[in-house]
Image (cartoon, rainbow, N blue to C red):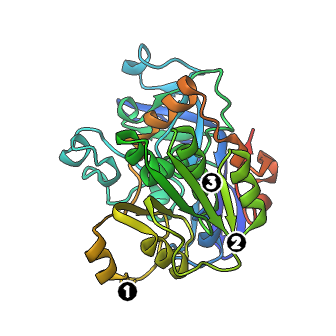
């Protein structure tokens, strides 16, 4: 079968590889229908991260079941549409049972589709089919009436929005939210859209990019254009940093209100990132960092999409065909979705 692989900096190629096969219980083969490019993928492909090629690409995807191991035939049907967490997890180890499937102890740490060492074992979504181990625990069915392209990013970038804002607004929607947009381009927009949908008292989206600001405005969000990130931008109950820069990070921390919640989608490839410690100490702050909990949070977003009308599709700025994927994945775009 054909699989798109990251071979070296700025180079992707379709490679012929053996088709995955069902070899044990609790497995499924899934045919990807829509694959999203994660905000991290472009820096990876440009050699700006610690991920080193070669490996297959594509970790945000939804698809349809081609085949399951025999004992799952009554639980999943052929052709059924499913969301697939990009993090591989068994569902039964102590970490999984504690709601930390992102750190499943049954598989090597951070095992995932389409990124780094895990991709060499589990594959990437830009393939004709992909093997899902622990299928009973990992697969999440969704309705045929839901557009696969609209939720292609649900396993990572859309659930980042749940991490950055949704969790906090679920507890109390009468809170103000500041989203600092930037290099995590789709994550910032998904977060602003989600906060608006969930009825936050105030949602402000701050960015330097006019096109992203227009998308934020299309969701009814207050969009504020800046030439550069200021030292602070008012005070907010919830601050979500998607800037990917030290300036945006610092602005976000300094814009946090008394006992506010700060979360970030920015990844800094170092352990030396300064914070305005004394200011945060005096005001009180709760800081949430870390990888998403893909398996736990996909159902939260799916419920909002299928039962409450949340529409993440306006964040998509380009849809490419399967044959265009190799070139499209390397081009600048706020949110790219590859569809069959």
Residue 67 visible somewhere in the drawing: yes
Please name whichever residue, 185 or 99, is drawn nearer the observer in this view of the structure. Answer: 185
What residue is pinned by disc 1? 272
Q: At which x and y percent is residue 193?
A: 60, 46
Q: CA distance from mark 2 to mark 3?
A: 13 Å
Label 3 crowd (10 A; few <14 / some 14-19 / many >=20): many
Return the disc, 1 or 3, that comes first in the chain's sequence.
3
As rendered, which of 236 and 30 lies closer to the eye? 236
Pointer 2 local density, CA inside 10 Å: few below 14, some 14–19, many at least 20: some
Say which label, 2 or 3, has the lower sequence index. 3
Instruction: Check disc 3 and report the residue beneath it.
Output: 189
- Nearer to the camera, 185 or 53: 185
**Camera-nearest residue between 157 and 54:** 157
The x and y percentages for residue 14 are: 72, 57
CB atoms of marks 1 and 3 within 8 Å = no
Q: Decide if residue 67 is on the left or right side of residue 322.
A: left
Disc 1 on helix, strand or loop?
loop
Q: Secondary structure at mark 3?
A: helix
- Which residue carries the number 2 mark? 208
Looking at the image, which residue is at 62% across and 42% down?
152
Which element type, helix, strand or loop, lies under badge 2? Answer: loop
The residue most toward the top is 74
In the image, what residue occupies the spot 74% across and 41% down?
339
Residue 140, position as x, y percentages in the image: 46, 30
């Amino acid at each position: 079968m054909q699989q798109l692989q990251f071979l070296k900096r700025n180079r992707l190629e379709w490679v012929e590889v053996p088709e995955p096969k069902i070899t044990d219980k609790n497995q499924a083969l899934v045919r990807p229908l829509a694959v999203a490019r994660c905000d991290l993928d472009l820096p990876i492909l440009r050699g700006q991260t610690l991920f080193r090629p070669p490996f297959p690409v594509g970790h945000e995807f939804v698809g349809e079941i081609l085949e399951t191991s025999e004992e799952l035939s009554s639980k999943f049907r052929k052709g059924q549409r499913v969301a697939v967490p990009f993090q591989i997890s068994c569902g039964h180890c102590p970490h999984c049972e504690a709601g930390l499937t992102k750190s499943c102890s049954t598989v090597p740490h951070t095992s995932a589709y389409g990124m780094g060492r895990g991709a060499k074992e589990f594959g990437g979504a830009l393939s004709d089919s992909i093997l899902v181990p622990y299928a009973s625990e990992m697969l999440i069915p969704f309705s045929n009436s839901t557009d696969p392209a609209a939720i292609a990013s649900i396993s990572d970038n859309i659930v980042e929005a749940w991490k950055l804002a949704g969790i906090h607004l679920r507890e109390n929607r009468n809170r103000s939210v500041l989203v600092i947009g930037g290099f995590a381009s789709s994550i910032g927009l998904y977060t602003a859209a989600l906060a608006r949908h969930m009825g936050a008292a105030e949602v402000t989206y701050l960015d330097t990019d006019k096109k992203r600001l227009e998308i934020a405005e299309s969701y009814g969000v207050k969009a504020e254009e800046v030439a550069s990130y200021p030292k602070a931008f008012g005070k907010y109950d919830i601050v979500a940093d998607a800037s990917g820069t030290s300036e945006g990070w610092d602005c976000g921390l300094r814009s946090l209100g008394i006992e506010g919640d700060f979360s970030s989608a920015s990844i800094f490839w170092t352990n030396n990132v300064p914070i305005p410690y004394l200011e945060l100490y005096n005001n009180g702050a709760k800081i949430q960092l870390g990888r998403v909990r893909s398996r736990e949070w996909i159902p939260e977003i799916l419920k909002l999409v299928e039962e409450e009308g949340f529409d993440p599709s306006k964040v998509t700025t380009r849809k490419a065909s399967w044959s265009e994927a190799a070139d499209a994945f390397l081009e600048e775009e706020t949110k790219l979705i590859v569809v069959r």
